[in-house]
Amino acid sequence: MASNTLRKRKIAVLGSRSVGKSSLVIQFIENHFVEPYFPTIESTFSKGVVYKGVEYDCDIIDTAGQDEYSILSSKHAIGIHGYVLVYSVASRRSFDMIQIVYDKIADFCGKNDIPCVIVGSKTDLQSRQVPPSEGEELAKLNKAAWVETSAKNNVNVGKVFELCLAEIEKRSASSQTDQPEAGRCLIM
Ligand SMILES: Nc1nc2c(ncn2[C@@H]2O[C@H](COP(=O)(O)OP(=O)(O)OP(=O)(O)O)[C@@H](O)[C@H]2O)c(=O)[nH]1
């Protein structure tokens, strides 16, 4: 397989509405913060990310906000290598959505170990409802990475995507494949 193919990674960013998914992605890709709120339909961004001295060509898919009734689109499972699941530290409800979204992905992929980083966003806000310990605990429970960020103050934004690559590479090193798990499904 060509090395270009080997280094292509697709990352989907999911979470409740208005938790700051687009702001996180735009801060990462374009290095600025977007104050006004524009609900996302779906956008894909590309960026080269160096992780452990290797450059990965990352497609980052910024999705529309989910709620408990949203059906996981196959576009957000098939061909995806890793996930960024975002909640706002100022919204308990958005935190509760993380396990729901994680379980939907796990169900779709037919496995319970998803390469994923759980992100507590908007740490610059004073109105915190979710302590760091709960975020860490949830991540541990799901064998995911965890980090808190502020897209507004550009805190830990790059780290989110490094952690996501680390989770992807950890698993692909053990399975010796670059195909995302769900990408191997056969549709009959
Ligand atoms: N204070 C603060 N506000 C933020 C931060 N990140 C995003 N916001 C604000 O939160 C609102 C929603 O941000 P978006 O990035 O559009 O949220 P989203 O999750 O993409 O929203 P949907 O597209 O509806 O799913 C906007 O007004 C942002 O300016 C942050 O780190 N700190």
Image (tube, helix red, strand yellow):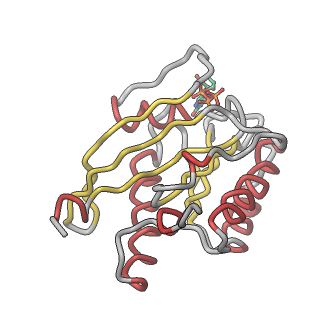
- What residue appears at the point 33 percent right and 29 percent down from the top-left corner? 30
In depth, the one of 109 and 142 nearer the eye is 109
Compared to residue 142, the image places residue 79 above or below, namely above
Q: Where does the C terminus fall, quadrant-wise?
A: bottom right
In depth, the one of 54 and 8 nearer the eye is 8
- What residue appears at the point 65 percent right and 74 percent down from the top-left corner? 111
Image quadrant, ligand 1: top right
- What residue appears at the point 19 percent right and 70 percent down from the top-left corner? 1
- Looking at this rendering, what residue extends furthest in the top direction? 36
Where is residue 117, by image quadrant? bottom right
User: Going by the image, does 167 lie left or right of 70?
Assistant: left
Where is residue 137, by image quadrant? bottom right
In depth, the one of 22 and 177 nearer the eye is 177
Q: Position of residue 99 (x, y in %)?
A: 77, 58
Q: Position of residue 79 (x, y in %)?
A: 46, 56
Q: Position of residue 122 (x, y in %)?
A: 62, 37
- Looking at this rendering, what residue extends furthest in the bottom direction? 174
